[in-house]
Image: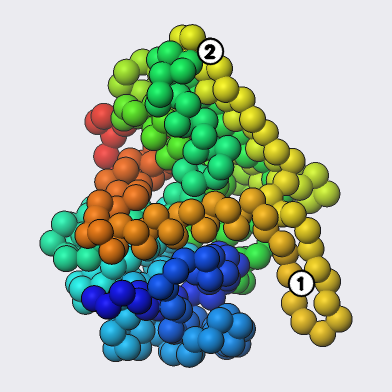
């Protein structure tokens, strides 16, 4: 592998554009190809960042890139990740790792057998506020962590191609698409596996189970309260509230929006200035590329992402049945 890392980007939607933007801050990294089945989407990113447009993942692999960055809907993650790993590439796959646990197990088996590194895009770990809070907690400055509260509320995201986020069969709704960040972050900070989850959910104009409240118990006795919503008014924007409570203190933080500004141009697409996201994704991708060069370990192991997936799917099952789900025995596809 040369000192320069070459990247092929699979998918050209909103999150792919954020990744492509973040590559510019990564020294020795070059985006060489973009693939997306929707005409015109790949061209927009490729032209902006000096890459070529290719038809699909096979064409990306034929170019011999070092890294495949998968930014497609979760129902496509498993096959694309496995194909890239089996071809000997390093893979960064957006969250959730897959749409189902069975698919995640296939990915885990492929990652174990492959020479490349697989990391999952749980970007909340890299937010400056989230990272600092975790570091403070890990240093023991608030004693033993006993409770985490994490709330993310917004309207139904409108940037998915053909509205796939609004289709629960594809996206899993906010519990899988959005709250999986909360479940991942809580388990990472608490440092203990989730063992039970109970969730209440309400339908809204945004779809089924689009306002949710989940409580998670961890093996060490700590708990997490996770609020997640796509049922809030568009005008309200995105709001986050978080708190970590320990035996000797507490940490809390919040913010009212993710975007720092917006540029409306006469002849081209609206451009969001994602100040907070720039920092998060720049750090996330930098950590991944550092791991590739060092030969591992992955910044966000697929095993941990699979546990976050199981917690989110367990919360969905709890909302459906009204039962508390024992994650130590629950089996799901």
Question: Which residue has dot 2 on it?
Answer: 249
Question: In this orientation, does residue 98 appear?
Answer: no
In the picture shown, does residue 87 fall above or below 177? below
Number of marks: 2
Could you say which disc has been placed on residue 175 in the image? none
Q: Secondary structure at mark 2?
A: strand
Alpha-carbon neighbours of circle 1 within 10 Å: few (<14), some, or many (≥20)? few
* In this view, 60 is above or below 123: below
Question: Is 50 above or below relative to 277?
Answer: below
Residue at 61% x, 71% y: name it. Answer: 162
Of the two numbered discs 2 and 1 on the same chain, state the one appearing first in sequence. 2
Q: Provide residue 294's location: percent of width, then percent of height.
A: 25, 59
Instruction: Determine the residue located farthest toward the right in the rendered image.
Output: 266
Disc 1, SS = loop
Could you say which quadrant of the image residue 109 lies in?
A: bottom left
Measured Cα–Cα span from mark 2 to mark 1 = 43 Å
The quarter of the image holding the N terminus is bottom left
Report the residue at 40% width, 73% height from top: 28
Residue 235, how many percent across, how many down? Answer: 83, 49
Per the image, the residue denoted by label 1 is 270
Q: How far across and how far down the image is residue 108, in percent?
A: 22, 54
Residue at image coords 29%, 88%: 62
Q: Is residue 151 above or below residue 205?
A: above
Find residue 328 and report its horizontal and vertical position in percent.
26, 29
Q: Nearer the viewer, residue 262 or 4?
A: 4
Outermost residue, top side? 248
Q: Residues within 10 Å of mark 2 (few under 14, many from 20)?
A: some
Residue 147, visible in the rendered structure: yes
**Front of the two marks 2 and 1:** 2
């Amino acid at each position: 592998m040369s000192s320069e890392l070459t990247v092929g980007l699979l998918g050209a939607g909103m999150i792919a554009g954020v990744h492509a933007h973040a590559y510019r801050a990564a020294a020795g990294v070059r985006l060489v190809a973009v693939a997306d089945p929707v005409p015109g989407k790949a061209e927009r990113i490729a032209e902006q960042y000096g890459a070529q447009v290719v038809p699909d993942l096979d064409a990306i692999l034929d170019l011999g890139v070092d890294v495949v960055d998968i930014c497609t809907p979760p129902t496509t993650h498993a096959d694309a990740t496995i194909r890239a790993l089996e071809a000997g590439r390093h893979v960064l796959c957006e969250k959730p790792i897959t749409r189902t646990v069975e698919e995640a197990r296939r990915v885990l088996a492929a990652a174990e057998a492959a020479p490349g590194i697989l990391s999952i895009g749980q970007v909340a770990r890299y937010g400056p506020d989230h990272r600092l809070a975790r570091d403070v907690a890990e240093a023991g400055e608030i004693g033993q962590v006993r409770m985490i509260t994490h709330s993310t509320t917004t309207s139904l995201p409108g940037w998915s191609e053909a509205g796939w986020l609004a289709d629960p069969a594809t996206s899993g709704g906010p519990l899988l698409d959005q709250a999986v960040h909360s479940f991942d972050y809580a388990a990472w900070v608490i440092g203990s596996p989730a063992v039970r989850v109970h969730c209440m959910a309400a339908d809204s104009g945004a779809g089924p189970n689009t306002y949710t409240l989940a409580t998670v118990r961890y093996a060490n006795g700590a708990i997490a309260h996770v609020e997640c919503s796509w049922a809030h008014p568009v005008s309200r924007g995105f709001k986050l509230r978080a708190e970590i409570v320990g035996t000797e203190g507490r940490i809390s933080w919040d913010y009212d929006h993710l975007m720092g500004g917006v540029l409306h141009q006469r002849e081209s697409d609206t451009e969001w200035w994602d100040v907070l996201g720039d920092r998060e994704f720049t750090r996330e991708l930098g950590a991944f590329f550092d791991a590739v060069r060092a030969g591992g370990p992955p910044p966000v192991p697929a095993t941990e992402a699979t546990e976050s997936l199981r917690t989110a799917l367990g919360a969905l099952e709890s909302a459906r049945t009204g039962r508390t789900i024992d994650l130590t025995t629950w089996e799901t596809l």
